[in-house]
Amino acid sequence: MDHIRALGKRLSNWRRWGADDERGTLNFITPDVVRRAAALVRRGQVFSLGLSFGADGPQIGQGGRVNPLHLMTAVDQKLPAEYPDAFRYADDVMVLPLQCATQWDSLAHVHYDGELYNGFPAATITSAGAARNGIDKVGAGIVSRGVLLDLARAAGVPRLQAGHAISPAELEAAERAERVRVERGDVLLVRTGHLSVFKADGDRAGYMRMMPGLGIACAEWLHAREVAAVAADTNSVEVIPFEDPKTPLPLHLVCLRDMGLTLGEMFDLDALADDCATDGVWEFFFSAPPLKVTGGVCSPLNPLAIK
Amino acid sequence: MDHIRALGKRLSNWRRWGADDERGTLNFITPDVVRRAAALVRRGQVFSLGLSFGADGPQIGQGGRVNPLHLMTAVDQKLPAEYPDAFRYADDVMVLPLQCATQWDSLAHVHYDGELYNGFPAATITSAGAARNGIDKVGAGIVSRGVLLDLARAAGVPRLQAGHAISPAELEAAERAERVRVERGDVLLVRTGHLSVFKADGDRAGYMRMMPGLGIACAEWLHAREVAAVAADTNSVEVIPFEDPKTPLPLHLVCLRDMGLTLGEMFDLDALADDCATDGVWEFFFSAPPLKVTGGVCSPLNPLAIK
Amino acid sequence: MDHIRALGKRLSNWRRWGADDERGTLNFITPDVVRRAAALVRRGQVFSLGLSFGADGPQIGQGGRVNPLHLMTAVDQKLPAEYPDAFRYADDVMVLPLQCATQWDSLAHVHYDGELYNGFPAATITSAGAARNGIDKVGAGIVSRGVLLDLARAAGVPRLQAGHAISPAELEAAERAERVRVERGDVLLVRTGHLSVFKADGDRAGYMRMMPGLGIACAEWLHAREVAAVAADTNSVEVIPFEDPKTPLPLHLVCLRDMGLTLGEMFDLDALADDCATDGVWEFFFSAPPLKVTGGVCSPLNPLAIK
Amino acid sequence: MDHIRALGKRLSNWRRWGADDERGTLNFITPDVVRRAAALVRRGQVFSLGLSFGADGPQIGQGGRVNPLHLMTAVDQKLPAEYPDAFRYADDVMVLPLQCATQWDSLAHVHYDGELYNGFPAATITSAGAARNGIDKVGAGIVSRGVLLDLARAAGVPRLQAGHAISPAELEAAERAERVRVERGDVLLVRTGHLSVFKADGDRAGYMRMMPGLGIACAEWLHAREVAAVAADTNSVEVIPFEDPKTPLPLHLVCLRDMGLTLGEMFDLDALADDCATDGVWEFFFSAPPLKVTGGVCSPLNPLAIK
């Protein structure tokens, strides 16, 4: 952990946006960034980057995370007797781990040494929810320029292997191949191709347990580039098995807790990547509001890319 | 009901977009509409139109609808013993009626005479969910030009009274006052001011039981203008008590079932309206993806307006 | 269905205990029956007949029934800061289909021709629950003499085959083999051995989809013997595939709707059966209170047999 | 806390029933105790001591505990098309905090200094549930002699005041008044009358926040009498506000963690007490099985007293 502590300290954004800040690198998204991002809408085509929420989701019960339970609480339901019999309606309820499919991890999701991002005590998270750094603090959503780096395509493979730790050099190689550059305020979308383990092979355990992903060396790169958020097509954004077997999820710790960098997981980037490969344009307008769950640690969502 | 059947038949969009269509008037949103909508982003300011999801929501248990239950399933949680004690995480689960706060009603939400929009049998909705016309069919979201008609402001009152049935003439008066015109493919946002009954007065029952809203005469107007979707700051978009006490929710029936027009409920339009009143611009880029709930009848969401 | 209607009419207990009765054959359990049942406690040994409620339950998602979701909402939780740090507690929440494991079916569970047991309209069951015949009407529980008929043992096999329809003659053969007689007010426990498909083989689908069970001919026998309730070690008490493929769950219809006879499902009778085989005593004190779920259609429980 | 630690050490039952024991004082319930308890059934009358589980329960959201959510997942539901239209069924789901109404607290519910009853590490409780001392370890239920001490009646008042700390002398005065003596293996039921604050007055907050209950001095008395379990008609069995404001829930700590004494909360003892006052018999057969929730910290139930 000591090297993580050192790295976290070096890349720390604590106090950068004030002692009360609960949004971290989302502060890089200024109105000017949004305005320029909107100008990227050229064809008016909308891509949904979200998985479905239902019994056929990717979860296998790890850490108590299950697929959503969708319950119909009214089917072909009449109103009270004074109304016409003809009127019918349907209602439904969902029970879902907020981490069960496509999601944002808020800055309250992980921590170490008793402190969350910006120095808030970990004890501000209780059974009542996250009083600090929760997903509800993201409020008006995450709207910015999106840049897709397709690491699988850049490597000339359908998908990176589980355990492959992506390096900064590989990120830059993808940038060069795509003729795009990740800049301040961007949301970086990392495609590894690993989602096909679930979508095409139907292998949930293979998808959820091991995966390619960003190596810890990328933390510095993300910091230098001043990205606003990072999302990937895997369950953890970062590589598993961990580069140092004794240090689990180091990128989560440094990004969420030290840098205040929101992470997006299980984004479906396949259709978007195909389109980008076709027209050669890897930047787009990106709109991905979380549900404003009061005190929520994470939020399910349906992110959109618009070209 | 017979006049509703007659009206529904007259305004029907069944087969307009083919026998298999499950999206109805969202088909008015062409790529060209999206492209032009994006051009409305001038300042890069993002407005969240969503209520919070939590125990403090507006529900009072009507028809079994309750406020969401947010459960922390991990707080200050360690990983297994082989990992450093320092690493901690939090996880959460939510139980929520999909109609509990800001939401889209899918075309599967209401029906009559045994048929849903486009003639699909009502029996396609079962305890397994909506096989037809479900919210998952909206897929890539509802992205278009948004136009806000502030009926309260146009009437010079803080809020319309519960039971006030908005007429097409009032919609057009608001258009004139705002110098905007609702057109094909637009998402129409109707502000009545009624949300303040909940937000400012804290009167949930007052907010949920009676409300101002569109009168049934507006159905024809919405049809003529070819709007893609309509949302309001109330729980039903349309007026309650009903204009004809024997005919509940007539606009729901005609819009959702006959016209295939998606309805949005409990949108918070107050901050957006203030901004529009200030700059005089009542049109904007509107991005409002539902969660892709498999077989879902409705979906919670956090809609965005971007100016 | 016509033969079922005719049988139901012949065995009907409607009005037998008054026009307001919602307990059906549980009325056979008089205080005298309870008193004599208690006298059967000779050794003071208690047998739990309940399955566990958890992710390892028997459900496979049929008809939306899933295994319970058990969520820890507090782990190693401190009280607010003014209290000693030493105090810690744990809390939990469960989400469970009330039919997910060992359960009582209330008289509101199935019906036909628009009427429930005792002629109450089926429309008394709404999205708010069962206003009539619900499990809450069982109130003080089901406490009586229990008699276990071990059909597998009587047949000299470890378990009856799925699809085996138990006949009244087989019930009486088991009675003779066990030197016991099912009488008015008894709770009859039917052991088929089929539970081992789940417990020993781990074959959930094999356990839930097809099963041995009472044939429809047993309805008359149960009526003649005036049993108070019947439970078995299967998911439906009755045989599946159905004897008449066009008539699903006929025993459910006649027992629950016409006779007012409560059914118990997925009772684990193995340890009790072994004990009865050892001491030759197949009758015992039986105590099996449901949870008093307001408007509940069914209830999970942990039934007890005491010898 | 130090005096609690000292008291806990003095009354400790750790290792008394072996290093693997997870049942604590329930071990006092021998078959002989059960046999003699059954002999108390003289009239065959069954009393339900359970509250209803539903939206009308006593919870006010304290610590995230809410009343159960009962969801109808099938109402008037048909089977697939190949079956007769006449067959209909209803199904339901419940979402409930396991502490929401009448319940047993397992020995995993509270702890201090990192250890549970019998020295198991507190870390055996994780987001997966209680691996040690959970309610599932109670298995065959809590069946024994029940003795009701009606402290309100003994004091000649309808109900004890919130904050009233019951002393051992008061317990013994009630014993003398009722001509009964609490003995080894008994389940002690303590009636304070406080439940009427909820049931009669409808004052949930008054019922849940402050209450009469056992003072910490009773711990020694319970230990000396070797009771198997204690239940009361309040939410905590013990008095609130706490006798020592700095030491919350001391009886919970000493009973559950040191003595291994299971606690029952929110038992409805009113009808039973009236009957006991009438016939002068304050002992009875007591049968109160928890649901076997795998890894459950607590369990809802419907306890029975049979006279």
Image (cartoon, coloured by chain):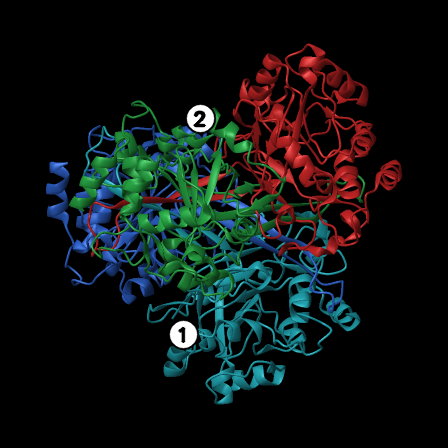
Chain colours: A cyan, B blue, C green, D red
Amino acid type, residue under disc 2 in the picture = Thr
Residue at (18, 40) in percent of width and height = C6
Write down the quadrant of residue B27 in the picture.
Answer: bottom left
Identify residue for label 1.
Answer: A272
- Left or right of residue C252: residue D186: right
Q: Nearer the viewer, residue D25 or A230?
A: D25
How many numbered badges does the structure rendering display?
Answer: 2
Q: Nearer the viewer, mark 1 or mark 2?
A: 2
Q: Secondary structure at mark 1?
A: helix
Quadrant where the N terminus of chain D lies?
top right
Q: Nearer the viewer, residue B21 or C302?
A: C302
Residue D134 seen in render: yes
For marks 1 and 2, give the CA distance. 71 Å
Amino acid type, residue under disc 1 in the picture = Leu
Residue B279 seen in render: no
Q: Nearer the viewer, residue A76 or C221?
A: C221
Establish if B70 lies above or below A209. above
Q: Position of residue C120 (x, y in %)?
A: 27, 30
Q: Quick one: label 1, few (<14), some, or many (20+) residues within 10 Å?
A: many
> Answer yes or no: do the residues labelled 1 and 2 have beta carbons within 8 Å?
no
Say which mark, if any, is on residue C30: 2
Q: Position of residue C254 (x, y in %)?
A: 27, 41
Establish if C78 lies above or below B118. above
Q: Nearer the viewer, residue D117 or A265?
A: D117
- Left or right of residue C71: residue C59: left
Q: Position of residue A98 (x, y in %)?
A: 52, 56
Specify the subunit that label 2 lies on. Answer: C
Q: Secondary structure at mark 2?
A: loop
Write down the quadrant of residue B158 in the picture.
Answer: top left
Q: Residue furthest bottom?
A: A156
